[in-house]
Amino acid sequence: MRPQHFPHHPRHLHPGAWWLWAVGLAAAAGRTQNPVPLLLALAVTGFVVGARRSTAPWARSYTAFLRLALLLIAVRVLFQVLLSASAEGPTVLFTLPSLALPATSGLKLGGAVTLEALLQATYEGLQLAVILCCVGAANALGSARRLLRYVPAALYEIGVACVIALTFAPQLVTDAARVRQAHRLRGHRGRGLRGLRRLAMPVVEGALERSVELAAAMDSRGYGRTTGDPLTRRRTGLLVLAGLLGLCVGVYGLLDVTTSAWLGAPMLLLGALVAVTGVVAGRRGHTGRSRYRPDPWALPEWAVTLSGVAAAAGAALDAHLHPALLVLASPTAVPPVPLLACAGILLAALPAVLAPPPPDSATPAARDAASPLGVAA
């Protein structure tokens, strides 16, 4: 094993390992509304991001995702207060003026607001917020642009489209900091609704422009271009898309315990088999591609990936053996502690130690990774 594969040697971890780790944590959060494992997963993502985040501009996106998660919880509670089907509990906190709605809508506007309804809405919002923070942690730790270098050549068009989608949020954070700094230099405070209106338009326009510029740079440099048979590319694309659809259905079946058993693991395995078949068939009909400075997949990558798998496996075992621990019988009851799920989530904190520290952003490698044109190389 080469020295750069050891955890203590500074290098960029393979972005696929970070995304697999984040998917495992998100899967664990998707199986429960118990605030104990949810808050633990949120703490783990923040701890790992703080320990292994680089100084690249896109690495600061976790804070934006965290703020968006808090806003999501507030919006979920607000909708529960304003629109709900019933009082959902005996403990009435206050009563709002109500407005009669058609009986077929199943909703009420205003009326009694109960403690049970607010707690249930908070737990549901917290679940979505933790999943969103897992995605934010993956964006902050593993560059989506570096991950797209490993998209199969037959999926060239999909890879270019994903560049615009996945780089929009990190570029949004980078442009927000740049525009806010420019406003401070001009003497503007940038607070309140007026400051938000002045900040929003250049930030959104700049982030979209940089994402499109990155996709254009990839296209001009021949990213993913091959000399294969067009029929082989179409067949490969159909197989991979069908496999990805099966993977999505399988993940939904695993996360939702109320669905049929065949929608879970069987569909997940079938989708993975079809997707792998498409990729293998596509490689046979395409010429090889060289990669500049490829990311190794060594022991740290396996450790990070397995820690995310441990989080998902712990939650899945608790959902099978002790389902009452993951779904609260009453929102006002004291949340129990699911030991297997919490133990798996704690194992997901190991990448803070096992993953290699990122190199300094002043080095040429880090500058290339942080550059909007870094993936085109």
Image (tube, grey):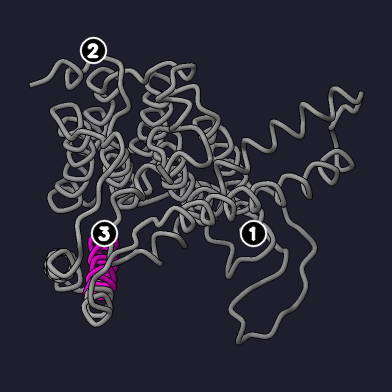
Q: Position of residue 292 (x, y in %)?
A: 31, 38
Could you classify mark 3 by the number of other residues whose Cα lies within 10 Å: few (under 14), some (14-19), or many (20 or more)?
many
Could you classify mark 2 by the number of other residues whose Cα lies within 10 Å: few (under 14), some (14-19), or many (20 or more)?
some
User: Tag 2, which secondary structure?
Assistant: loop
User: Tag 1, which secondary structure?
Assistant: helix
> In the current view of this chain or complex, which residue is farthest to the left?
1
205, 364: nearer the viewer: 364
User: What residue sits 49% from the left and 45% below the top?
Assistant: 129
Could you say which disc has been placed on residue 79 in the image?
Answer: 1
- Looking at the image, is mark 2 or mark 1 nearer the viewer? 2
Predominant SS of the magenta segment = helix
84, 63: nearer the viewer: 63
191, 159: nearer the viewer: 159
Q: Which residue is mark 3?
A: 152
Dividing the picture into quadrants, the one containing residue 1 is: top left
Q: Three-letter amino acid code at disc 3?
A: Pro
Q: Three-letter amino acid code at disc 1?
A: Phe
Magenta residues span: 239-257
Q: CA distance from mark 3 to mark 1?
A: 43 Å
From this view, report whether residue 255 is shown above or below residue 20: below
Q: Position of residue 215 (x, y in %)?
A: 51, 55
From this view, report whether residue 83 is shown above or below residue 17: below
Dividing the picture into quadrants, the one containing residue 112 is: bottom right
Q: Which residue is mark 2?
A: 8
Sequence-earlier tag: 3 or 1? 1
